[in-house]
Structures are given as C-alpha cells and as structure tokens.
Image (cartoon, rainbow, N blue to C red):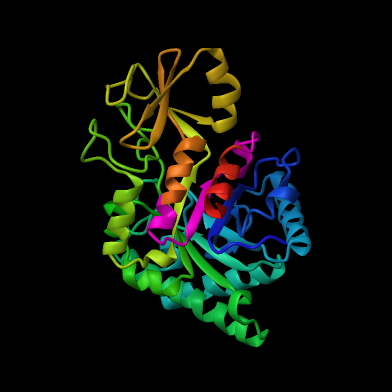
Amino acid sequence: MLQQKKIVLAYIAGWKNWDDLPLERDADRLTHICYAFANIRDGEVVLLTDGSEHQARREEGLAELVALRGRHPHLKLLISIGGWTADGFSDAAFTPEARAKFADSALDFLQRYQLDGIDMDWEYPSNDMAGIKARPEDKQNFTLMLAALRERLDALSDKQNRKGHERYLLTIAAGAGQYFLDGVEMEQVAAQCDFVNLMTYDYYNGWATRAGHHTNLFNTPVDPEGDSCARSVALLIANGLPAEKLVLGCAFYGRSLAGAATLGEAGEKGSNGSHSYDEIVETLLPSGAIRHWDDAAKAPWLIHDGRFVSYEDAESIAHKIAFVKQASLAGAFFWEYTEDHQDVLLAAIWQGLNS
C-alpha cells in the first residue's frame, strides 16, 4: 500500500461509468473518494431524488467503491451531498428540529453504505444563484448544520473506538470567491470540518461572455482583477480557513466560448460549452486546435473552430501542485475522475506530490 502526506481526492460522478478506467491502480494514488451525489428529500439524505432507473446503478457504484476500499484500506470513502442546483439545504438547516432530522438521516446513510465521512456540497448558503431556496439565516444555520453533523460523527467514532485517521470525516466543497464568504461563517465552518475542498475552477463558466481562464493558478495581465487559485486561497485563508485544511481544486474538463479569438476577447452570449479532458486531447487537439500557454497565469488555452477553450493540462497541474506544497496546503482534489482516460492529469498530481 502506498502512502503520502498530502490529500489526493477524486470526485466520482455516480451517473457515469468508470468500468474502463483502472480504478484498482488509481486507488493507490488516491487518499479519498467523494461519491457524487446524494441529495435531500423531505429533509433527509437520499441517494437520488427523482426515483429513476439509475438508482440501482448508483447503489452498485457505491458498493464497488466500498469493495475497492476493502482492498486498499488506506482509502477514505465519503458521500457528497448536494451539487449544483441541488435544493433542500435551507429548509433542512432552518430549525433545530430540521437539523437534527437531517443529521440523523446523514448518519444512517453513512452507516448503511459503510462510508468514512460526509462531504457537504451546498452551492451555496444564503445564495440562490443555482436556482435553489436561500435565506439570510442560512449563514448561521450552515454552521449549526455542520455542528450537528460533527457531534454525531464524533459520537459514532467514540462509540466504535475509532481513533486518529480512522475517525469519521466531515468536509465541505466551498466556493472560491467572496460570493461564498458572504453567505457563511468561514472560521466557524472551518472549525467543524476536517478539510475544505476549494472549488478553484469555473472562474469563467457557463454564462461567461468573454474569454478567460477557468482554473488559472495566478492572475494574468489581461485580467488583473479577475479570479485565480492563488487569489482564492489568500482570500479564504484571510477569512479564517487554515491553510492546512485547504484542499486545492483541479479541473479535468475545460470551458469554452464561441466567437472569441484570444484571451480576454468578447464572445457570443449563450455559446458556452464544457469539454472533458478526453475530448480536448482526443478530438480538439488532433483536429487542428492550437494550444497557447499563459505563463503569467500558468494556464493553457486553445482555439478550435472559432471557439476559445480554457482547460487544465499536465503543465498547469505541475504548477498547481508546486503551489500546494509551497503554501503548505492540505493537498489537491479534482472534478471529475471519468473525464481523463489518458492518465495525464492524475499522474501529474501524483508525481508532483511525490517528487
């Protein structure tokens, strides 16, 4: 069994198929897997909210990961609750009774599926940008919701005599900007969590109207006041998230915009796209896309058929991992495991942390 000091966490989407990926090999590179997603229905944690035929496959996926952990006992398996447009959080956090109901159901879920922890992916407390219910009270209620989970996870760890790294985990996926901080009590939230997965991607996203990096390490002269991983990390740390609890996000996909011929140029409104790393290297680059490198941002971009594409590659990952080490961060995570069949990006994370 291979061990390493830094976290390497993979989000795995439960609706995708990973049968053709070497998860057995990659389990020795990973420290944690977050299975995405469970949701909230009637105030309780459920694996799926739409009752579709995918329920059985998702449960099968969790069972496969539990079996994988049995062969790689260092690996920690968490359920990620929420995701973009996932509703139910504000109501589940609103009263002491609702928080208790939610937390009890989360613990039942964890024990039913033999998991090691809970990852809360509320996007975002006090904020309705994803079309979900939001209240001003979410700011304090999120802290209380996490405290209810923390209390129950610790009690279960004590009951089962789990010590040290065997104790049950509580983590969150956090937005990487002021919009997130405005809706949470960051210092109090961090105190409840074992670590925080900072979503340092989608800086230019599905509604961007000009070409920009979506997961750049540093700011670029073209966009000096824009977002970057380094700026997000500094912002979150200044607001109470300890560096040793911060896990930096990497993107195994790209963001695109039609009509923009270079970085910073305006594009066609509503023409935004998303492309897996597989698509970028198997389709876009072989069919004439031109790769460019922004050395200030430490990030690549390309032009393909009149479309600007911002993405991550081995070179940008290497700079990110060097930053993780230099800044004494907890490690790195990525969304999403099935989007790189080439073993380029995970290999770059692994090699960077173990060099």
Task: Give me the residue at 66% from left, 66% from top.
Answer: 115
Q: Is residue 173 above or below residue 222?
A: below
The verdict on residue 334 being magenta is: yes
Q: Nearer the viewer, residue 216 or 48?
A: 216
Tell me where residue 14 appears, x and y as whole percent. Answer: 65, 48
Q: Is residue 94 visible?
A: no
User: Where does the magenta region start and end?
Assistant: 323-343
The extreme left residue here reads 225
Task: Give me the residue at 56% from left, 65% from top.
Answer: 118
In this image, 153 relative to 27: left or right? left
Q: Nearer the viewer, residue 99 or 217?
A: 217
Tell me where residue 127 appears, x and y as whole percent. Answer: 33, 53
In this image, 286 relative to 216: left or right? right
The verdict on residue 212 being magenta is: no
Q: Quadrant of residue 78?
A: bottom right
Q: Is residue 35 above or below residue 252?
A: below
